Structures are given as structure tokens and as C-alpha cells.
Image (cartoon, helix red, strand yellow):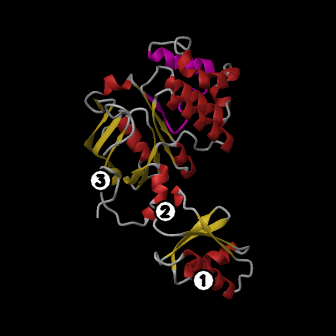
């Protein structure tokens, strides 16, 4: 498959698998990530994202398959690779009793460098945490902890950065600021691989892989994945939301329905029916069932809608493009 970036791909995975006893965490996934790409792994908790990250960052061995990062085999050449990789774990893993400055100086020293020498690399993040440099890491807000962890992951000038769910548990403003920082880093040419359970963050990536039960269901640009949705989408709203959901589930033409914020997202089982009559028929059915305040509107599908739809697709090993086999 092709992917963005110049020259040799930054990451190549071939039939990569990881088993923990009878549990299959990563199930024969194959993909490539281009140099300079901002690539997202999108999936719910337990989908295999962290296990895949830990393989690619040489922290655990794969059960089978092969992977290279920056042209280095993650098993045979792990020591040469570790100097070139930046990794930010999903759980805050810095030293809580050390200050911001002490944590950063410690991680710089591990790689034989200093904060001052690497200031050009870390400055976009450092200027935001510098006012708190004497504060213990344990006393930082969630957003500041993540920025400190990102700074520590960058202080040795890695060629590729792996971020495992970096914004989980962080407020909306801090999430946006963090992704703005990733955009700045990407503009400098850094390859970034990020995992997240938040579907709305997928649009900030060049390409994304939808992952569930250890398998990759699709890989493409966010726009292309959204366009792959194969039927009209409607939002359905009424004051009695519980009864509304029950009635829509009972509607004979329902293909799927699930809560989405303050509304329900509905798709019809008839893929060739005109959109306007479908919405009008659903509204008429619900009104006939005694709901007087029903609102049915056509809506644009999101990546989350695609993810939900593909979760119901037949299971099978994914090919190199991330498409489930028949």
C-alpha cells in the first residue's frame, strides 16, 4: 500500500500479532506509516492499541509477525532503535515527587543531553510549563502533566514520536491545546503516531486506522473513511428519550440506532430509498406512537458512525490496507 511521506516508510508492520495466553490483543495486523505523517490509531479501550504501541516501541515482543520502525527491526535491533524513538505512555509515568524541571533534566541526562542543548526542539511546549518548573509533577493539572510528559519524550530529539492516548482524562481546552502542539511538531517534519478513544480527534490526523478486537477494520484519511458510510444518516430527537429509543428499535425499517449526545443516530435498512421519504416515514411512525415533539433531520455521518457500522461487519483478518477479508 502507499502512504504519505518521502523515501522509506517510518513504520512497517507485517502480520503482527500479540497473544497473552488465550487472549489475542493484536491479531495479524499489517500497515505502513509514512515519514512525516501524523497517524492515528482510533479505537475503544481494549481494542489492542496499547499492545501494538508497546511492540513498536520495543517494550514487548510480538507473538508472531514482523515490524520495523525507522528501518530497524523492533526485535533484533531494539537497542539501536530506542535512542531514536520518543514514547509517551497512556498513564502518567513521570516521577511525581520531582519538580517539572527535575523530571525534564533527568530524562535529558538519560539520553546524554541537556535542556539547554535541546531547547529549540522542546521550546513550543516548554514555554507553557516553564512557569511551573519548580512545582512537583504530582501537583500539576492533567493538561500540564501531559505537556510535561510530551516535553520529556521529545528532549532527546527522537525521529518518531509514539503517544498512547495522550488526552484521556484531560479537559476539552487542554485537549485542543495538545493537538495544536502536535500540529506544530508535525510541521517540523516529525513523524507522530497517536492512539485515542476520542473519535473527534481523528480529523486532526493525516490518516487513521480504526481498530477493534485487535484487528484493523479500515485505514484511510478521515475524509475518505467518512465518505465510505453507505447509507443516509438521520438524527432523531424527542423529549422522552428513553421511549424514543425503544420505539425506533422496534421500527421495522431500522438498520441501526444508538444515542449520540442529545440525539439518536438512525440509519434505515433500505439503502436505495430516497432520503426525504425515509425521514418522513420515520417521523410519521413515531408521531403515530404518541410522540408529539419528534424531530427527524438528515445528518452527515462522522468517523464514529463509520466505526459503529464497521463493528457490525463480518469478522476476518485485515489485509495490508486494513480491509477485513471476506
**Residue 245 appears left or right of 269:** right
> Is residue 91 located in the magenta-colored stretch of the structure?
yes
Q: What residue is rendered at 52% in x and 11% in y?
A: 117
Q: Nearer the viewer, residue 138 or 87?
A: 87
Q: Which residue is mark 2?
A: 308
First-in-chain label (2 vs 3):
2
Quadrant of residue 170 within the rendered picture: top right
Which segment did they paint magenta?
A: 86-111
Asked if the residue under mark 3 is in contact with the one under mark 1, i.e. CB atoms within 8 Å, the reply is: no
C-beta proximity under 8 Å, tags 2 and 3: no
- Using the image, tell me which numbered label, if any, was put on residue 281: 1
Mark 1 to mark 3: distance in Å? 40 Å
- Residue 90 versus residue 258: which sits nearer the camera? 258
Q: Nearer the viewer, mark 1 or mark 3?
A: 1
Please report the residue visible at 60 percent of the width from the left and 24 percent of the height from the top.
124
Closer-to-camera residue (234/143): 234
Q: CA distance from mark 2 to mark 3?
A: 20 Å
Q: Which residue is mark 3?
A: 319
Circle 1 sits in a helix, a strand or a loop, which is it?
Answer: helix
Amino acid at each position: 500500500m502507499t502512504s504519505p511521506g518521502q523515501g522509506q516508510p517510518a513504520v512497517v508492520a507485517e502480520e503482527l500479532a500479540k497473544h497473552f495466553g488465550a487472549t489475542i490483543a493484536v491479531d495479524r495486523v499489517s500497515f505502513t506509516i509514512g515519514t512525516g505523517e501524523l497517524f492515528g490509531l482510533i479505537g475503544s479501550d481494549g481494542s489492542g492499541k496499547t499492545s501494538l504501541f508497546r511492540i513498536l516501541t520495543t517494550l514487548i515482543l510480538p507473538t508472531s509477525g514482523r515490524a520495523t520502525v525507522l528501518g530497524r527491526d523492533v526485535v533484533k535491533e531494539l537497542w539501536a532503535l530506542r535512542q531514536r524513538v520518543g514514547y509517551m505512555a497512556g498513564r502518567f509515568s513521570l516521577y511525581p515527587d520531582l519538580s517539572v524541571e527535575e523530571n525534564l533534566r533527568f530524562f535529558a541526562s538519560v539520553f546524554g543531553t541537556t535542556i539547554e542543548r535541546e531547547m529549540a526542539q522542546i521550546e513550543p511546549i516548554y514555554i507553557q510549563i516553564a512557569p511551573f518548573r519548580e512545582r512537583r509533577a504530582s501537583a500539576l493539572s492533567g493538561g500540564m502533566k501531559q505537556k510535561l510528559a510530551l516535553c520529556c519524550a521529545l528532549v532527546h530529539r527522537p525521529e518518531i514520536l509514539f503517544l498512547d492516548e495522550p488526552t484521556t482524562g484531560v479537559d476539552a481546552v487542554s485537549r485542543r491545546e495538545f493537538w495544536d502542539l502536535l500540529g506544530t511538531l508535525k510541521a517540523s517534519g516529525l513523524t507522530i503516531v497517536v492512539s485515542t478513544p476520542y473519535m473527534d480527534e481523528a480529523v486532526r490526523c493525516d490518516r487513521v486506522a480504526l481498530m477493534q478486537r485487535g484487528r484493523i477494520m479500515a485505514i484511510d484519511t478521515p475524509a475518505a473513511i467518512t465518505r465510505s458510510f453507505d447509507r443516509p444518516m438521520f438524527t432523531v430527537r424527542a423529549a422522552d428519550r428513553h421511549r424514543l429509543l425503544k420505539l425506533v428499535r422496534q421500527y421495522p425499517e431500522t438498520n441501526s440506532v444508538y444515542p449520540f449526545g442529545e440525539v439518536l443516530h438512525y440509519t434505515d435498512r433500505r439503502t436505495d430509498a430516497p432520503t426525504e421519504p425515509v425521514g418522513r416515514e420515520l417521523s410519521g411512525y413515531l408521531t403515530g406512537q404518541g410522540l408529539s415533539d419528534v424531530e427527524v433531520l438528515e445528518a452527515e455521518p462522522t468517523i464514529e458512525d463509520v466505526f459503529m457500522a464497521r463493528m457490525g461487519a463480518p469478522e476476518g483478518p485485515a489485509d495490508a490496507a486494513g480491509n477485513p477479508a471476506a
